[in-house]
Image (cartoon, rainbow, N blue to C red):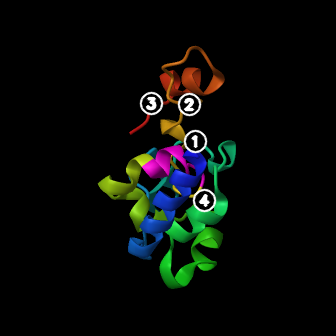
Amino acid sequence: MALFTLLLVLASLCHFASGGAMPIDICSMVVPVAGQNPVRRPSLPVENCQDRDPPACFEIFKYGNDEDQIPAENLVPTNDYKVPENCQKAEYRMLARQMCPQKCATCCLTKEYNCQNGNSFWCNLRLIYPLQ
């Protein structure tokens, strides 16, 4: 029953979801690039976390007309990493963190990486290289 309710909520949000992309500003770090300005990249590899419902994440968090181009550009380490605009809006942040951490690059906010649950490789790495 709870899953059905969640799907209804997600379906209602799909109606309001708009497309667009913007440089990441949550769970990000500034990376220097030789010969150009620094770029913003995810503080943790997005491959480390999974979306709970990829089809719903695809519908709610859209890049707009660049649905294929932006993920390809995100693979280039000298580019700013872009996420769907809704991922960074306050009203969608909890959904981005809980349901779509890979699509929205919010892995650092998930319980596996937020460092409140104990000692892990990623938490120790954050002590050496703090998030910005």
Q: Amino acid at mark 2?
A: Tyr
Label placed on residue 44: 1
Q: Earlier in the sequence, mark 4 or mark 1?
A: 1
Residue 33 lies in the magenta-colored region: no
- The residue that appears at 57% across and 73% down in the rendered structure is 70
Q: Please, what is the three-letter code of the amino acid marked with disc 3?
A: Pro
- Foreground disc of the pair 4, 1: 1
List the residue tagged with mark 4: 77
Per the image, the residue denoted by label 2 is 113
98 in the magenta segment = yes
Mark 2 is surrounded, within 10 Å at the Cα level, by few (under 14), some (14 to 19) or many (20 or more) other residues, namely: many
Q: Could you tell which of marks 4 and 2 lies nearer the N-terminus?
A: 4
Q: Residues within 10 Å of mark 4 (few under 14, many from 20)?
A: few
Instruction: Tell which residue pokes out farthest to the top in this image.
Output: 118
Q: Which residue is mark 3?
A: 130
Q: What's the residue at 40%, 67% (across, down)?
A: 85
The residues bearing labels 4 and 2 have C-alpha atoms spaced at a distance of: 22 Å
Q: Specify the segment rendered in magenta.
A: 95-102
Q: What residue is drawn where x is 60% and y is 28%?
A: 122
Residue 98 lies, in percent from the top left, at 51, 44
The Cα atoms of the two marked residues, 4 and 3, are separated by: 19 Å
Vertical position of residue 65 compared to residue 58: above or below = below
Do labels 1 and 2 touch, CB within 8 Å?
yes
Circles 4 and 1 in contact, beta carbons < 8 Å: no
107 or 53: nearer the eye?
53
Residue 125 x %, y %: 57, 26
**Which sits earlier in the primary sequence, circle 1 or circle 2?**
1
Which one is nearer the viewer's eye here, 77 or 61?
A: 61
